């Protein structure tokens, strides 16, 4: 039903968005009594101008509309997700991946993983001194999570439930040391070997791997297409997956939240990098961060830019890696 509804709305929604009664009649005639609850919520978003708001705001405050549905109208989260996802597809021709067709509770604790074919690439850049010299690094195949780990996945892994009502799709911003406990718990539950990406793996994936087009940011040379940064974030973090993915199908590797890597930070490490599956220095005081955030200027969100912080005090986002031998159920 979802995809049929998307097709109807896509064909007629732009023409009739200012004539909601006509659009509602068209939808009800098509489905003739099926899924009444869902159609009633679609009707609600039309008559109250929410659908038009999503379109006019170009999706940037889409999360606010979701909160209105849940908090002001008492719509359960799964149905609200479904409707918001439907409208987002109509106006912007892509899914938010917030809800599936049957509104099933997300019992899974494992993140969705993207296969990254290994290869050689030029690591580094020209923005800051610690990005130099640019040098060749070769990596094996690996899997990287499609999104940064969300609050929902964090909660379900550690607490077996979601405690962040209305915030479950926001990134889980945690201390590096806390993340090690989370990963350990996840690995016990799944019998796999999840880990943080190395700095080299992160940059290779952010640059698009073998499919790289040489973009300044992850997936584009226009930062607003792929990231929430100082100029477009309204100084707040955003739900994952609302911007364009990069060449590999990875979201939010530019902006939104800084992401932890496994490496210790050394500003001169690139001079001595091993070049093959580089894992950073053996010790240090700070851990590496990559990607920039919703508070950063464009320059700090380039794919080669390095940052660092104390692993015991700084709270930032993260995504996970599986090595090829830990493939498990993932076949992408």
Image: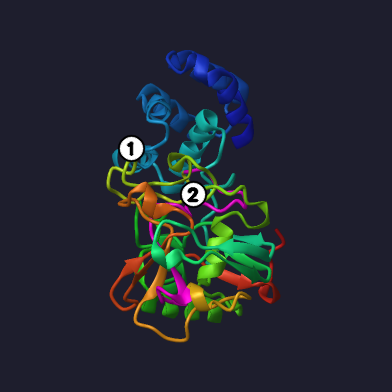
Residue name at image x 52 percent, y 79 percent: 272
Is 175 on the left or on the right of 40, as rendered? left
Q: Are marks 2 and 1 in contact (CB under 8 Å)?
A: no
**Rendered position, 24 above or below 42:** above
The residue pinned by badge 1 equals 73
Magenta span: chief secondary structure: loop
Q: Residue furthest bottom?
A: 282
Q: Which quarter shows the C terminus?
A: bottom right
Would you identify the image quadrant in which residue 115 lies? bottom right
The residue pinned by badge 2 equals 217
Residue 49: x percent and y percent?
Answer: 36, 24
Residue 133: x percent and y percent?
Answer: 50, 67
Magenta-highlighted residues: 243-269
Pointer 1 local density, CA inside 10 Å: few below 14, some 14–19, many at least 20: few
Residue 1: x percent and y percent?
Answer: 62, 35
**Rendered position, 117 above or below 256:** below
258 is within the stretch colored magenta: yes
Residue name at image x 43 percent, y 58 percent: 291
Is 251 on the left or on the right of 60, as rendered? right
- Please tell me whether mark 2 sits on a helix, a strand or a loop: loop
Q: Nearer the viewer, mark 2 or mark 1?
A: 2
- Please tell me whether mark 1 sits on a helix, a strand or a loop: loop
244 is within the stretch colored magenta: yes
Would you identify the image quadrant in which residue 9 lies? top right
Viewer can see residue 53: yes
Tell me which numbered mark, 2 or 1, is placed earlier along the sequence.
1
Would you identify the image quadrant in which residue 43 lies? top left
Pointer 2 local density, CA inside 10 Å: few below 14, some 14–19, many at least 20: many
Residue 292 vs residue 144, the one in the foreground: 292
Viewer can see residue 161: no
Residue 197: x percent and y percent?
Answer: 53, 70
């Amino acid at each position: 039903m979802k995809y049929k509804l998307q097709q109807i709305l896509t064909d007629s929604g732009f023409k009739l968005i200012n004539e909601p009664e006509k659009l509602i009649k068209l939808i009800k005639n098509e489905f003739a009594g099926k899924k009444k609850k869902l159609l009633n919520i679609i009707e609600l978003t039309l008559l109250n101008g929410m659908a038009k708001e999503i379109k006019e705001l170009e999706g940037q405050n889409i999360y606010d509309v979701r909160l209105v549905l849940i908090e002001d109208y008492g719509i359960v989260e799964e149905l609200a997700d479904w409707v918001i996802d439907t409208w987002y597809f109509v106006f912007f021709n892509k899914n938010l991946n917030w809800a599936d067709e049957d509104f099933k509770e997300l019992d899974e604790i494992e993140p969705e993983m993207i296969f990254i074919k290994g290869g050689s690439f030029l690591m580094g850049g020209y923005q800051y001194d610690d990005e130099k010299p640019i040098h060749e690094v070769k990596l094996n195949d690996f899997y990287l999570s499609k999104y940064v780990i969300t609050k929902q996945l964090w909660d379900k892994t550690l607490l077996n439930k979601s405690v962040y009502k209305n915030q479950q799709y926001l990134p889980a911003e945690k201390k590096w040391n806390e993340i090690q406990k989370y990963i350990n718990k996840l690995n016990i539950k799944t019998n796999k070997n999840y880990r943080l990406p190395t700095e080299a793996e992160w940059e290779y994936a952010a640059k698009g791997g073998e499919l790289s087009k040489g973009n300044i940011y992850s997936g584009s040379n226009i930062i607003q297409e792929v990231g929430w940064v100082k100029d477009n974030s309204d100084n707040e973090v955003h739900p994952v997956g609302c911007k364009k993915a990069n060449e590999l199908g990875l979201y939010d590797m530019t902006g939104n939240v800084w992401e932890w890597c496994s490496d210790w930070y050394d500003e001169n490490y690139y001079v001595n990098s091993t070049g093959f599956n580089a894992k950073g220095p053996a010790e240090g005081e700070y851990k590496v961060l990559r990607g920039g955030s919703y508070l950063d200027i464009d320059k700090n969100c380039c794919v080669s830019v390095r940052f660092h912080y104390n692993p015991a005090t700084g709270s930032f986002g993260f995504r996970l890696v599986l090595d090829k031998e830990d493939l498990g159920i993932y076949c992408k």
